[in-house]
Amino acid sequence: MAKVIEQISVFLENRPGSLVEILELLAGQGIDLRAYSMAETSDYGIMRIIVHDSGAVMEALRAAGFTARKTEVLGVLIPDRPGASVETFRLLSGAGINVEYTYAFALAGSGQAVLLLRVDDNARAGAVLSGAGIALAQHREIF
């Protein structure tokens, strides 16, 4: 089984203020966002977040009326420098693994970044990357 990171996807109305509402809720609960990403359509947005305690965050979101779900993504440790992610994507592409979406963040002061990947097969992608000597991050390692 590949190392995975729990991600929460929150569905938001695509209207002014909806992002502020969720950020205020999370801040009010003392929740630190390690990383987040926003994507949108004309009617709604999807905020993808990485937090330390996904269970507590899911409870807070649902109690406030937000629709949210957990998914597992791969976290790939890469050097924090230009072009560092190319080899990861080359390996996945060569193995026929589809990357549905990706986002990244730097680990402060470490010289490393974490590339978060939603792929069509976590176990296979994890095996391909690990087999090539690319380090995968566990959830607890990024906090």
Image: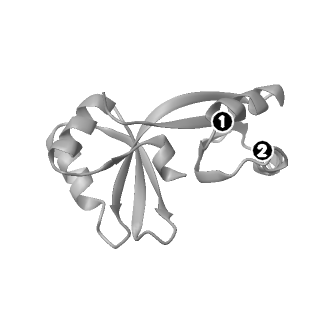
What secondary structure is marked by label 1?
strand
Can see residue 63? yes
The residue lying at 83 percent from left, 31 percent from top is 64
Q: Nearer the viewer, residue 67 or 135?
A: 135
Figure check: 107 above or below 88:
below
- Residue that numbered label 2 is attached to: 22
- Where is residue 105 drawn, in percent x and y? 49, 60
Q: Specify few, some or many for label 2: CA neighbours under 10 Å numbering under 14, 14-19, or 20 or more.
A: some
- Identify the amino acid type marked 1: Val
Relative to 141, is 44 above or below?
above
How has the structure been colored for display?
Answer: one colour
Q: Decide if residue 22 is on the left or right side of residue 89.
A: right
Residue where numbered disc 1 is placed: 10
Q: Position of residue 42 (x, y in %)?
A: 65, 41
Upstream in the sequence, badge 2 or badge 1? 1
Q: Residues within 10 Å of mark 1 (few under 14, many from 20)?
A: many
Whether residue 121 is visible to the viewer of this picture, yes or no, is no
Query: Residue drawn 46% across and 49% down?
Result: 141
User: Which of these two is toward me, 40 or 75?
Assistant: 75
As measured in the structure, the alpha-carbon distance from the residue carrying label 2 to the one carrying label 1 is 9 Å
17 relative to 5, above or below = below
Residue at horizontal 35 percent and vertical 55 percent from the top: 77
- Number of numbered discs present? 2
Q: Is residue 113 above or below residue 66?
A: below
**Amino acid type at image mark 2:** Ile
Find out whether the residues at labels 2 and 1 contact each other: C-beta distance under 8 Å. yes
Left or right of 86 on screen, residue 118: right
Residue 139 position, x and y percent, is: 48, 42
Residue 25 image point, x, y percent: 82, 44
